[in-house]
Protein backbone atom coordinates (compact mmCIF):
# COMPACT_ATOMS: atom_id res chain seq x y z
CA UNK A 1 0.00 0.00 0.00
CA UNK A 2 2.90 2.32 0.65
CA UNK A 3 4.06 1.67 -2.90
CA UNK A 4 0.63 2.59 -4.24
CA UNK A 5 0.69 5.82 -2.21
CA UNK A 6 4.17 6.67 -3.48
CA UNK A 7 3.06 6.03 -7.05
CA UNK A 8 0.03 8.26 -6.53
CA UNK A 9 2.21 11.03 -5.07
CA UNK A 10 4.62 10.82 -8.04
CA UNK A 11 1.70 10.83 -10.47
CA UNK A 12 0.24 13.86 -8.72
CA UNK A 13 3.61 15.61 -8.83
CA UNK A 14 4.03 14.74 -12.51
CA UNK A 15 0.55 16.04 -13.22
CA UNK A 16 1.43 19.33 -11.48
CA UNK A 17 4.62 19.57 -13.55
CA UNK A 18 2.67 18.91 -16.73
CA UNK A 19 0.14 21.61 -15.83
CA UNK A 20 2.99 24.10 -15.25
CA UNK A 21 4.52 23.17 -18.59
CA UNK A 22 1.12 23.64 -20.26
CA UNK A 23 0.82 27.12 -18.79
CA UNK A 24 4.31 28.03 -20.04
CA UNK A 25 3.51 26.67 -23.50
CA UNK A 26 0.29 28.71 -23.63
CA UNK A 27 2.20 31.85 -22.58
CA UNK A 28 4.80 31.20 -25.29
CA UNK A 29 2.09 30.61 -27.89
CA UNK A 30 0.32 33.83 -26.92
CA UNK A 31 3.61 35.72 -27.12
CA UNK A 32 4.41 34.19 -30.52
CA UNK A 33 0.91 35.00 -31.77
CA UNK A 34 1.36 38.64 -30.74
CA UNK A 35 4.74 38.77 -32.48
CA UNK A 36 3.23 37.35 -35.68
CA UNK A 37 0.42 39.90 -35.55
CA UNK A 38 2.96 42.71 -35.13
CA UNK A 39 4.98 41.38 -38.06
CA UNK A 40 1.83 41.12 -40.18
CA UNK A 41 1.00 44.76 -39.37
CA UNK A 42 4.50 45.84 -40.36
CA UNK A 43 4.24 43.94 -43.64
CA UNK A 44 0.90 45.60 -44.39
CA UNK A 45 2.43 49.01 -43.64
CA UNK A 46 5.35 48.23 -45.94
CA UNK A 47 2.94 47.22 -48.72
CA UNK A 48 1.09 50.53 -48.32
CA UNK A 49 4.35 52.48 -48.58
CA UNK A 50 5.29 50.40 -51.63
CA UNK A 51 1.96 51.21 -53.29
CA UNK A 52 2.38 54.91 -52.51
CA UNK A 53 5.90 54.93 -53.89
CA UNK A 54 4.69 53.25 -57.09
CA UNK A 55 2.06 55.97 -57.48
CA UNK A 56 4.67 58.68 -56.94
CA UNK A 57 7.03 57.06 -59.47
CA UNK A 58 4.24 56.78 -62.06
CA UNK A 59 3.38 60.45 -61.54
CA UNK A 60 7.04 61.38 -61.91
CA UNK A 61 7.32 59.37 -65.14
CA UNK A 62 4.25 61.14 -66.51
CA UNK A 63 5.78 64.51 -65.63
CA UNK A 64 9.07 63.53 -67.25
CA UNK A 65 7.26 62.55 -70.45
CA UNK A 66 5.27 65.79 -70.44
CA UNK A 67 8.38 67.88 -69.78
CA UNK A 68 10.24 66.15 -72.62
CA UNK A 69 7.32 66.73 -74.96
CA UNK A 70 7.23 70.44 -74.08
CA UNK A 71 11.01 70.72 -74.43
CA UNK A 72 11.05 69.06 -77.85
CA UNK A 73 8.14 71.26 -78.98
CA UNK A 74 10.05 74.38 -77.93
CA UNK A 75 13.19 73.16 -79.72
CA UNK A 76 11.22 72.50 -82.92
CA UNK A 77 9.50 75.91 -82.72
CA UNK A 78 12.83 77.68 -82.17
CA UNK A 79 14.36 75.79 -85.08
CA UNK A 80 11.46 76.78 -87.32
CA UNK A 81 11.74 80.37 -86.16
CA UNK A 82 15.47 80.43 -86.95
CA UNK A 83 14.83 78.98 -90.40
CA UNK A 84 12.07 81.53 -91.01
CA UNK A 85 14.27 84.42 -89.89
CA UNK A 86 17.13 83.21 -92.10
CA UNK A 87 14.71 82.96 -95.03
CA UNK A 88 13.48 86.51 -94.46
CA UNK A 89 17.02 87.81 -94.07
CA UNK A 90 18.14 86.13 -97.30
CA UNK A 91 15.02 87.26 -99.14
CA UNK A 92 15.44 90.91 -98.13
CA UNK A 93 19.16 90.79 -98.77
CA UNK A 94 18.52 89.54 -102.28
CA UNK A 95 15.77 92.09 -102.81
CA UNK A 96 18.06 94.79 -101.47
CA UNK A 97 20.72 93.93 -104.05
CA UNK A 98 18.23 94.09 -106.93
CA UNK A 99 17.21 97.62 -106.16
Image (cartoon, grey):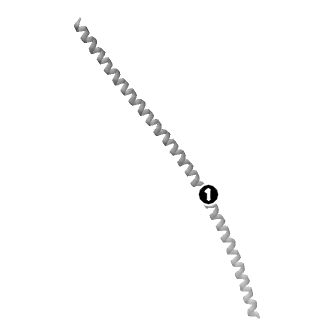
What residue appears at the point 66 percent right and 65 percent down from the top-left corner?
A: 30
Classify residue 81 as left or right of residue 45: left
Q: Quadrant of residue 2?
A: bottom right
Neighbour class for label 1 at 10 Å: few (<14), some, many (≥20)? few
- Vertical relation: 40 (above or below) 56: below
Q: Return the x and y of residue 86 as percentages of the image width and height.
A: 29, 18
Farthest-out residue, top: 99
Position of 30 with respect to 54 (left or right) is: right
Closer to the camera in the image, 85 or 9: 85
Residue furthest toward the left?
98
Residue that appears at 61% across and 57% down = 38
Quadrant holding the N terminus: bottom right
Q: Look at 34% across and 23% down and name the residue there.
A: 80
Of all residues, the one furthest to the bottom in this rendering is 1
- Residue 56 spot, x, y in % from top left: 51, 41
Instruction: Give the quadrant of residue 15.
Output: bottom right
How many badges with numbers are in the image? 1
- Specify the quadrant of the image occupied by residue 78: top left
Above/below status of 4 relative to 77: below
> Which residue is nearer to you in this view: 48 or 81?
81
- Residue at the image position 72 percent from the left and 78 percent from the top: 16
Query: Left or right: 19 with respect to 35?
Result: right
- Answer above or below: position of 55 versus 99: below
Q: 64 and 35: which one is in front?
A: 64
Q: Secondary structure at mark 1?
A: helix
Residue linked to disc 1: 38
Q: Quadrant of the C terminus?
A: top left
How far from the left and from the top, in percent, is residue 48? 57, 49
Provide residue 29's location: percent of width, then percent of height: 64, 67
Amino acid sequence: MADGLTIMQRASQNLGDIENMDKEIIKDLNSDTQKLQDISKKVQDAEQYYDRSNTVIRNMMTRVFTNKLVLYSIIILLGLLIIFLLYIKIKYKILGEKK
